[in-house]
Image (tube, helix red, strand yellow):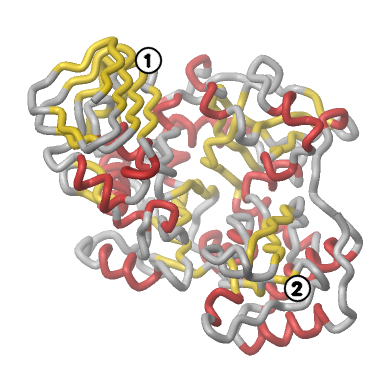
Amino acid sequence: MASKGNPRGLQLAREKMRQAGVDEVAIDTFAHYYRLLEHGETGMIAEDTIEPLDMEALADVDVPGDTAAEAIRSTAVIKLNGGLGTSMGMDRAKSLLCVRRGLSFLDIIARQVLHLRQEYDATLPLLFMNSFRTSADTMAALARYDDLPVEGLPLEFLQNKEPKLLEADLMPAAYPKAPDLEWCPPGHGDIYTALRGTGLLTRLIDAGYRYAFVSNSDNLGAVPDARVAGWFAGSGAPFAIEAVRRTPSDRKGGHFARRKQDGRIVLRESAQTLDRDREALADLTRHKFCSTNNLWFDLQAMVEALDARGGILGLPLIRNVKTLDPADPTTPKVIQVETAMGAAIEVFEGARTIEVSRERFVPVKTTDDLLVLRSDVYQLGRDFVLDQSGDEVPYVSLDGDFYKLVGDFDKRFPEGAPSLREADSFTVHGDWTFGRDVKVVGDVTLSAKAAKRVEGGTVLDEQEQHG
C-alpha cells in the first residue's frame, strides 16, 4: 500500500536524526528506505516468484579438527542485545533474565565464550549490539567478567534509531508526552550499518579477524561452534545462515526460498507474505527450512559489498505498521521501517545455508519457551553449552492471562520448572501453581476455573485434568 508522502517529510526526518546524534551512514540508509516507501514499495515476496530451497546438513559434513580450530581463531562473535523483553513484562534487557542455575543469558554467553577461548587458544572477541535502552544494564552485568574484553575492541556498540513515520503522510511522528515513543529501532538489519558507522568492520579486519558470527542473545543454542566455523571457512562463501527444519510451531514464521529470477537465496519473513500466500507459507512440506538467525559472514566481503553500494546494503524493506503508542490503540498509525539481517543472504553471490540440529536454535520469545529452557529438557554442561535430552522438544502452551508476564510466571513456579523431558505436550488453562518436583509425562492438559495447586512430587501423565 502506498503512502502519500509530504515533500518535507524526509527533510524533517533527516534533521531530527541529526539533532539526535544519529550516524550519517544510518541517516542515508533511512533515506533510502523512505524513498522506497514514497514509491509504494511494500517489501512483499509473492509465492509465484520463489521456489523451495534444499540444503546440506552439518551432520553430513566432514570438518577436520585443525580446520575448525583455525577458523574459530579467526572469528569475532556478535550478539544482538537490543530487546527489552516488553512482551513478557520486562523493562530492561531481556538477556538479564535468569534462565538456568541462577545464571542469566548474559552470564551463560560470557562463560560459553571464555570456555571456547581456553579450549581453542582463541582470542574470540565478544561484542554486543545494544540499544540505548539496554546498554547500561548490560554493561553493568558484564562488569564482573574482568577477562571478557579484548584489548583494542569494545564490548558493545549501539544500534541506530530512526523516527516513526505517520502512515497518513510519512511525516515524522510527534508525541510530546512520551518523546521516546517517537523513535524505533530499524530492525536487526541495522547491524551492518552500525558496524560500518562505528568503524568496527575495519577495526576487526585490522586486528586480524576474518569472520563474524552473529546471533540473538536470547538463543543460548547459538554457541560460536568451531565445526560450523570450519565448514564456513571451507565453503569459501561470503555469507551463510544456519537453518533448521520447520516444525508445526514455525508455520507462521519466515522461511528460506530461492528466487526464480536470479537464483539467489532469499529469506521471506511472515510480514513479507501476501494474504493469498499464507497457505504456502504454512506448508512445511514445501518450505522446509527456517532461519535460526545464526549468521556467518566474511568481514572483507561485507566491507566490499557496502563500499560497492555507497554504504547501503539494500536489504528488502519490511513495512511494519503499528500504533504510535503500542499500549494505546487510539494513537495514530505509524510505519516503522525495518530490515532483517538474514535478508543480506540475497545480496551475496555464492551465499550458503546449512541445516543444523535444533539444539542450535533455542529462542526465548515467550514464557512458554522459558519454561522449557528452565526444565530438565536441557542440561547445562561444564562448557556452558545446552545439551537437549531426547529428540523432540515438548510443545508448551501456558494461559496468557496468568503466565504471560515473567513476574506472574515466576509466582506460579516458585519451586522451579516441572520435569518435561518425558512430556510430549503441556497445556495449561486457568490459574495453576506448581510445587517442587512435579513431573509431566506424555500429553497433559490442565484446566481450571478457579486458582488450583499441583502438589510437589505429583506425576501428571496422559491426562486432561479439570479443576
Residue at 63%, 89% (x, y): give it: 19
Q: Mark 1 points at which residue?
A: 391
Q: What element carries label 1?
A: loop
Mark 2 lies on a secondary structure that is: helix
In the drawing, does residue 391 fall left or right of residue 387? right
Quick check: 269 above or below 187? above
Q: State the image coordinates of residue 170 (x, y, percent, origin top left).
A: 79, 72
Q: Which residue is drawn at 55% across and 66% down?
A: 328
Q: Which of 182 and 148 is in front in this view?
A: 182
Mark 1 surroundings: few (<14), some (14-19) or many (≥20) residues within 10 A = few
Q: What residue sits right under mark 2 in the picture?
A: 28
Q: Can residue 364 be seen in this view?
A: yes
Instruction: Please say if 105 is above or below 39.
Output: above
As shown in the figure, which amino acid type bears the numbered disc 2? Asp
Query: On the rendered structure, is 110 left or right of 356?
Result: left
Report the Cα–Cα distance between label 1 and label 2: 47 Å
What residue is rendered at 29% in x and 24% in y?
Answer: 446
Mark 2 Cα-neighbour bin, 10 Å: few <14, some 14–19, many ≥20: some
**x, y percent for residue 401:** 37, 44
Instruction: Tell me where residue 344 appears, x and y as whole percent.
Output: 69, 47
**Residue 173 or 349: which is nearer the viewer?**
173
> In the rendered image, which quarter is residue 380 located in?
top left
Which three-letter amino acid code belongs to the residue tagged 1? Asp
Residue nearest the viewer, comparing 38 with 399: 399
Marks 1 & 2, CB-CB < 8 Å contact: no
